[in-house]
Amino acid sequence: MEECLDAKSGAAAAAADGLPDDAIVEILSRVPARSISRFKCVSKPWRDLIADPLHRKRLPQTLEGFFCSDGAGAAGGFRWRFISLPGRSAPLAEPSSSFLTKLPGIRNIRLLGSCNGLLLFEDGGNPATAPAYVVCNPATEEWVAVPSAGCACPDPLEERTDLIFDPAVSPHFHLVHICQEDFMGEIEVRAYSSETRVWSDRASQQSSWQDEGGLEQWVNGGAILKSMFGGAFVNNMLHLVIFLLEEYRIAAVDRGGKTCRIIPWPDKCSFPLVVGQSQGRLHCVGRLEERERNCLKWAGLSIWVLDDYDTEEWVLKHRVSFLELFGQMSCHYGYNINVLAVHPDRNLIFIVQKSNQKLISYDMDSKELHAFHSLGHNYGSLTPYVPNFMELVVTNCNNPK
């Protein structure tokens, strides 16, 4: 359908002149998100329909930009700003507005991540207690507080909490909390549902966990959780990077906190940088390495896509050298760049160039590198944001407006 509309946009615009607005919006709501921006060029009426805030609630959304934390403010909290992608205006509900400062009980919030329009914050204001969480939707300015997971690891070696939300499957969100107290020690997994509003009890689920083939390989010791690489929600599963049996692998965890499988890392010659979801499939970005006089250097990037989820068949999607990217043969380990994310609908990756604090996009199709924002020296975390206009479905959803 997308190809037909692209090829016959003029005819489609003429034919649509006699249709009511609701019918046109209904048609547009059935095409992929990456097509909506192109359809603004079909005609002025179509452009106005797509730009209308009421209509956009029914249209598929794509990446608008990134939240960026700018470090602690005068009151001890964090300052936030929003970085729009080139060619996209700021989201309809400005995410850098004072709404984020009105979340009650949050003294020192830290943005942990996002998933399909919802943001997950952690309250680190009281180090004497375990952190609690807030899930909010900037587009609707709604929020809900989530209690601590109550894990038994007082000082975990590795710890992470991920947000899972798929409005096509359920209006409820889930949190998955994972912590590992010791090096290669047992990994504890707990899950929270906004429907039940309780965290799962690990002891009550232990027998069912043992039935899951992949879970026992990494939860019961022998694996190392690698929280630095982020996570990706694909195929109704949360995908995380782990180190198991002297190899990097991907652990797939469902929303209930049970691991169904362990997926091999696609390229043993590359070091993991980030996992992401793009066009409905799992993507991995790795760092190609080389040694020069016993000095480890980066030689380039490789991007892999899990082409068949059932057979675990990986396909090399793209490979690019640092000479092509930055005009230099290589860069020293851990220096100069950080791969931030994969675009959810396009063949783009986003890179932070540390030497000049530039936010850069790299197009795998055109092989073009574009620096579109200067972060400044005080930038902190960067989190991708895709708007979602669904209301939060919880028992006592709060609205600070």
Image: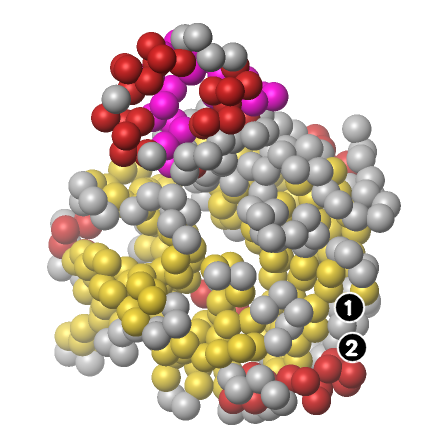
Query: Can I make out residue 374 in this image?
Result: no
Q: Position of residue 198 (x, y in %)?
A: 81, 65
Q: Vertically, is 42 above or below 338?
A: above
Q: CA distance from mark 1 to mark 2?
A: 6 Å
Proximity of marks 1 and 2: CB atoms separated by less than 8 Å: yes
Q: Vertically, is 332 above or below 80?
A: below
Q: Residue at x 29, y 47 (%)?
A: 347
Bin the neighbour count of mark 1 within 10 Å (Cα to Cα): few under 14, some 14-19, many 20 and up.
many
Q: Residue at x 58, y 84 (%)?
A: 212
> Looking at numbered disc 1 in the image, what kind of residue is underneath it?
Trp
- Identify residue for label 2: 201
Bin the neighbour count of mark 2 within 10 Å (Cα to Cα): few under 14, some 14-19, many 20 and up.
some
In-image side of 204 versus 352 (left or right): right
Does residue 67 belong to the magenta stretch?
A: no
Image quarter hosting the N terminus: top left
Secondary structure beneath dot 1 equals strand
In-image side of 48 versus 123 (left or right): left
> Looking at numbered disc 2 in the image, what kind of residue is underneath it?
Asp
Does residue 39 belong to the magenta stretch?
A: yes
Secondary structure beneath dot 2 equals loop
Question: Magenta part mainly helix, strand or loop?
Answer: helix
Image quarter hosting the C terminus: top right
Q: Position of residue 111 (x, y in %)?
A: 62, 51
- Identify residue for label 1: 199
Q: Position of residue 65 (x, y in %)?
A: 46, 37
Taking depth in this image into account, of 45 and 156 the one nearest to the observer is 45
Q: Residue at x 86, y 45 (%)?
A: 396
Q: Which residues are magenta?
A: 34-55
Taking depth in this image into account, of 384 and 337 the one nearest to the observer is 384
